[in-house]
Image: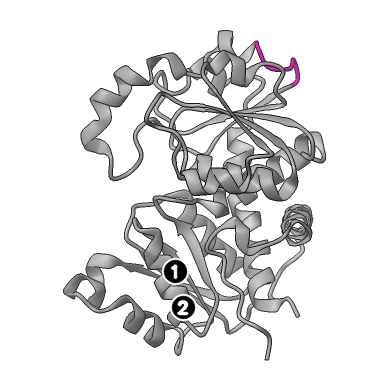
């Protein structure tokens, strides 16, 4: 029996596996444009637990399972026994006896660890407050499609030191690129995550310094889910961290812009940038499907 592999963060895979998933996602995308069908998961079922709302994550994983001949079951927290206080370990033990793989999108990263510890099938982190590893797979696929290898390249993260920023730090460590981060004071990324990748990451005091001569510029909303009460305060503190054309022009002339979406236009990014020639956000969003397919294959079918 193969060892169960979980995907709690990018640190659950090594560089060779990361690149294998990206390459497979690109191959699946090419095959699908040619009408080649994927039925490798016939008879397989994924349970999708959502404690946080979603568009891209839900549609990507649900469609991924259908495209590969499998089935996905959507479970919102308020329509399951979790809403009545069922222990997460108990939920995990029950589900993993009925399905082949579990995807969870929740607030607390400890819940992912708890589910994985109790599960007899692979568990995927669909997003927590600490990491968003599935999105990074799509981001890296997009970069590789557009520019080739990211090793040694200069990447700029501007804005909140959130789960996306933490996952970019993990990716920098694994894929060996240079990540420059600019956040307002008090909104820096997770220290433990940062310490693991200190040779690949630089904290900058100004957005312009981070973006200068970069190959990729990326950001996220200033207020993540769960922090809505801080929205107005954050708008004031983050005002100088908007990705606009003036800031983007400090990057390389062929730099690309990514955003995991949804975007709050004219806040963290202007419409001029997100709809402009450097933007690859729609390609990036669509790639969530292909990286989801490649990740599921990797977790369920790799020897």
Count residues near mark 1 (Cα–Cα under 10 Å), then give few for <14, some for 14-19, many for 20+. Answer: some
Q: Position of residue 157 (x, y in %)?
A: 56, 30
Q: Is residue 164 left or right of residue 143?
A: left
Point out which mark residue 117 bears: 2
Vertical arrangement, residue 24 with respect to residue 173, above or below: below
Q: Is residue 17 left or right of residue 168?
A: right
Residue 292 in sight from this viewpoint: no
Q: Position of residue 292 (x, y in %)?
A: 60, 59
Q: Position of residue 96 (x, y in %)?
A: 46, 84
Which coloring applies here? one colour
Point out which mark residue 173 bears: none
In whole angstroms, how far apart are the C-alphas of marks 2 and 1?
6 Å
Residue 133 in sight from this viewpoint: yes
State the quadrant of the N terminus. Answer: bottom right
For residue 52, which quarter of the picture? bottom left
Q: Residue at x 43, y 32 (%)?
A: 160
| Mark 2 touches mark 1? (CB < 8 Å) | yes
Q: Dot 1 lies on which element?
A: helix
Point out which mark residue 113 bears: 1
Q: Residue at x 47, y 33 (%)?
A: 220
Q: Residue at x 44, y 69 (%)?
A: 113
Q: Which residues are magenta?
A: 250-254
- Asked whether 252 falls inside the magenta stretch, the response is yes
Q: Dot 2 lies on which element?
A: helix
């Amino acid at each position: 029996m193969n060892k169960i592999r979980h995907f709690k963060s990018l640190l659950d895979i090594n560089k060779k596996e990361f690149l294998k998933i990206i390459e497979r996602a690109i191959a699946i995308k090419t095959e699908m444009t040619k009408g080649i069908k994927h039925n490798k998961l016939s008879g397989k079922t994924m349970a999708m637990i959502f404690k946080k709302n979603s568009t891209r994550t839900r549609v990507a994983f649900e469609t991924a399972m259908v495209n590969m001949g499998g089935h996905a079951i959507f479970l919102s927290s308020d329509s399951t026994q979790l809403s009545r206080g069922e222990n997460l370990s108990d939920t995990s033990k029950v589900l993993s006896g009925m399905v082949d793989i579990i995807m969870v999108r929740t607030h607390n990263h400890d819940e992912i660890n708890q589910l994985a510890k109790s599960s007899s099938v692979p568990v995927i982190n669909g997003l927590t407050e600490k990491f968003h590893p599935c999105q990074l797979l799509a981001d890296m696929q997009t970069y590789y499609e557009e520019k080739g290898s990211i090793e040694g390249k200069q990447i700029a993260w501007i804005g909140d030191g959130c789960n996306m920023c933490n996952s970019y730090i993990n990716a920098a460590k694994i894929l060996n690129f240079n990540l420059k981060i600019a956040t307002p004071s008090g909104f820096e990324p997770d220290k433990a995550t940062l310490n693991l990748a200190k040779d690949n990451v630089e904290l900058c005091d100004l957005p312009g310094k981070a973006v200068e001569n970069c190959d990729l510029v990326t950001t996220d909303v200033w207020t993540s889910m769960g922090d809505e009460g801080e929205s107005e305060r954050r708008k004031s503190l983050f005002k100088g961290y908007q990705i606009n054309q003036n800031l983007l022009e400090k990057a390389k002339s062929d730099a690309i812009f990514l955003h995991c979406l949804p975007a709050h236009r004219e806040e963290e990014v202007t419409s001029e940038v997100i709809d402009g020639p450097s933007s690859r956000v729609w390609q990036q969003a669509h790639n969530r499907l292909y990286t989801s397919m490649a990740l599921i294959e990797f977790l369920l079918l790799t020897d």
